[in-house]
Every structure is written in structure tokens, then in C-alpha cells.
């Protein structure tokens, strides 16, 4: 049986001036699948060879083969670019001659042309490749990560409390709680150097983009000093400033900001009053 939207090991049955025909697995040569010479890539093939071909339905409804691997296959989470918006939905580049459709009903959030997002590739009712941003059904928690490990991930959604849902390695479910990040995150953002700080009972990874406390405080102290130096030794921020203002300017929690100010005052680098903070 031929798997549409996936790789199949098929015998090369016939050669023509424009390519080859692969065994269609029906014992009827009319069902053999065209492998156009444009889609052989750098491979060299001969009659009787068994090739690992990706099979899909082309724009004319025919089964078609390529030896050039696409950027994804059915039931696989892929990070792909949106290349067009139309009246029937959006199209994404999967590395095939024709881009594939993301129907309006298959979008769980707005897509911007030129940006990349995570998609679940599936077959529509006609057997053609299509995609959806709903990737939850393909996510797993069967990983081997431990607390303290560093991973990368892609944002694919947000919970009602603004915690960011993240996919690690295009397969593992993870979350960054709202109080763990201080920059604006968007769907499709690719995040590097995330630390595993918790593994939930269901196996989901708890992540943070923040450094370990000591390193984060050291970095924040330097950031505060640099800010003061670039503003004539004064800033309006102090330990009474609002968490929102601190987060916006320093990408830090108020708790850590106050700690950093305290350390700098103990080191006798700064002092503060009701008007702000000053370099000594």
C-alpha cells in the first residue's frame, strides 16, 4: 500500500524521456507513479532499483514522486514559512513544487506572511497535503531531559494566564510560566538556551529563559550600572518602581531588580532615594 505524504520504497519499473515510473503496488501499470527527472535530485537510478520516494498528490490529482526530501511529512510537526494568504486560507512552503494549504478552519491563531510557525501536516478529504497550527495531538512527554538541561523550543500557543506553550525538538510539550519571561513572545518565536526547571507529573517540561539566579543577578547588576552610566549617573527607577516598568526596561522581575540594587548598594556603587537611583 502506498503511503501518501510519506516516504515509500518503490521499484523503478519504466524509463521515459521525461523521467521514470515507480511501481504503484497494484499490479496495473496504469497505476505506476511518475518520478519526473526534475525531482531526482543528485541521485543516479536505473531500472530495477528500489528508491525511497516521497509520494504526494499533485495539483491535477495524480500520485507523484520525488527523491528530493520535503521539509515535512504527514503526522509530523514542522517549522515552516507562510508564503501567501488567499481567500481559502494561507499557503506554506514545504519544499515541494506546490505550496500546501492551511485552511482558515485549521488556523488556531493569525499567521503573518514571511514568518515561520509550527504546523501539523495531514491529508485533506481529497488526499492532498494540508496543514494546521493545532499540534497538540502530536506532542509527547516521552523525553529523556532532566532538570538543569538546556533546550531550544518554539512558541505555539498561550494559556489564559499568558504562560507560553512551547514545543521542544518539534515533538515534546513544554511550558514557560508567565512569571518566567519578561519580553513579548509571539506564536512561532524560536527560543534558545531555555533551562529545564521542572518536570511536571505528566512529563511536561517546565522551562525558563532566565539564567541561574547568581548569573542573572550578576548580569542585572551590570545592566543597571550601564544604564546609569549612559544616563549621567541617574535613573528614575528604584525599589519602589512598578513591576511593569522594571520588566519593560530591564527584562527582570521586581524581586530580582530589588536584590540587584541591594547588592550594588552593599558594594557602595550606588545610592537611592525617592527620586530614583544614582551612581556614587
Image: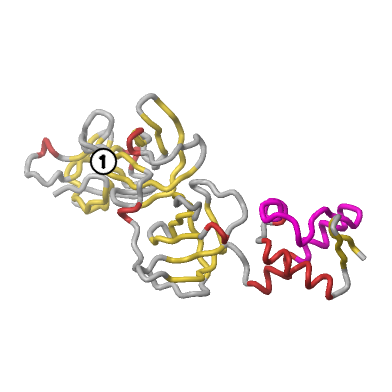
Left or right of residue 116, residue 222 in this image: right
Determine the residue positioned at 29% across, 40% down.
Answer: 129
Q: Which residue is mark 1?
A: 56
Towards the viewer: 193 or 156: 156
For the question of whether residue 69 can be seen, the reply is no
Residue 121 lies, with reference to residue 208, above or below; the image says above
Give the SS element for disc 1.
strand
x, y (%) of residue 134?
35, 46
Q: Nearer the viewer, residue 272 or 257?
A: 272
Residue depicted at x 29% and y 51%:
75
In-front residue for pair 51/195: 195
Q: Residue 69 appears at what percent x and percent y?
A: 36, 48
Is residue 96 positioned above or below 177 on the image?
above
Which percent across, then down, holds residue 242? 70, 54
Q: Looking at the image, can residue 87 be seen?
A: yes
In the drawing, does residue 185 fall left or right of residue 42? right
Give the quadrant of the C terminus. bottom right
Other residues around mark 1 within 10 Å, as few (<14) / some (14–19) / many (≥20): many
218 sits to left or right of 211: right
Residue 268 is left or right of residue 17, and the answer is right
Instruction: Read off the magenta span.
Output: 221-249
- Res 264 quadrant in image: bottom right
- Indicate the position of residue 212 as horizontal and vertical percent values: 62, 72
Queried whether the magenta region covers residue 248, the answer comes back as: yes
- The vertical placement of 55 against 202, above or below, is above
Amino acid at each position: 500500500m502506498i503511503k501518501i505524504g510519506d516516504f515509500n520504497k518503490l521499484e523503478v519499473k519504466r524509463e521515459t524521456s521525461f523521467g521514470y515510473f515507480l511501481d504503484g503496488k497494484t499490479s496495473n501499470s496504469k497505476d505506476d507513479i511518475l518520478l519526473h527527472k526534475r525531482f531526482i535530485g543528485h541521485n543516479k537510478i536505473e531500472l530495477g532499483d528500489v528508491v525511497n520516494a516521497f509520494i504526494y498528490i499533485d495539483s491535477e490529482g495524480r500520485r507523484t514522486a520525488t527523491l528530493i526530501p520535503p521539509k515535512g511529512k504527514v503526522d509530523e510537526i514542522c517549522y515552516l514559512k507562510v508564503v501567501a494568504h488567499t481567500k481559502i486560507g494561507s499557503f506554506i512552503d514545504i519544499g515541494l513544487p506546490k505550496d500546501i494549504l492551511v485552511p482558515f478552519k485549521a488556523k488556531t491563531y493569525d499567521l503573518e506572511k514571511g514568518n515561520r510557525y509550527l504546523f501539523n501536516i495531514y491529508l485533506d478529504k481529497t488526499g492532498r497535503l494540508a496543514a494546521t497550527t493545532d499540534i497538540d495531538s502530536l506532542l509527547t512527554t516521552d523525553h529523556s531531559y532532566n532538570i538543569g538541561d538546556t533546550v531550544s523550543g518554539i512558541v505555539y500557543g498561550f494559556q489564559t494566564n499568558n504562560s507560553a506553550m512551547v514545543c521542544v525538538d518539534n515533538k515534546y510539550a513544554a511550558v514557560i510560566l508567565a512569571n518566567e519571561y519578561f519580553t513579548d513572545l509571539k506564536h512561532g518565536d524560536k527560543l534558545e538556551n531555555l533551562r529545564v526547571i521542572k518536570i511536571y507529573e505528566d512529563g511536561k517540561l517546565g522551562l525558563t529563559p532566565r539564567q541561574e539566579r547568581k548569573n542573572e543577578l550578576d548580569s542585572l547588576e551590570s545592566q543597571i550600572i550601564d544604564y546609569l552610566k549612559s544616563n549621567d549617573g541617574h535613573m528614575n527607577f528604584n525599589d519602589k518602581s512598578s513591576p511593569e516598568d522594571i520588566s519593560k526596561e530591564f527584562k527582570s522581575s521586581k524581586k530580582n531588580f530589588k536584590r540587584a540594587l541591594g547588592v550594588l548598594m552593599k558594594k557602595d556603587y550606588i545610592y537611592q532615594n525617592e527620586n530614583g537611583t544614582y551612581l556614587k
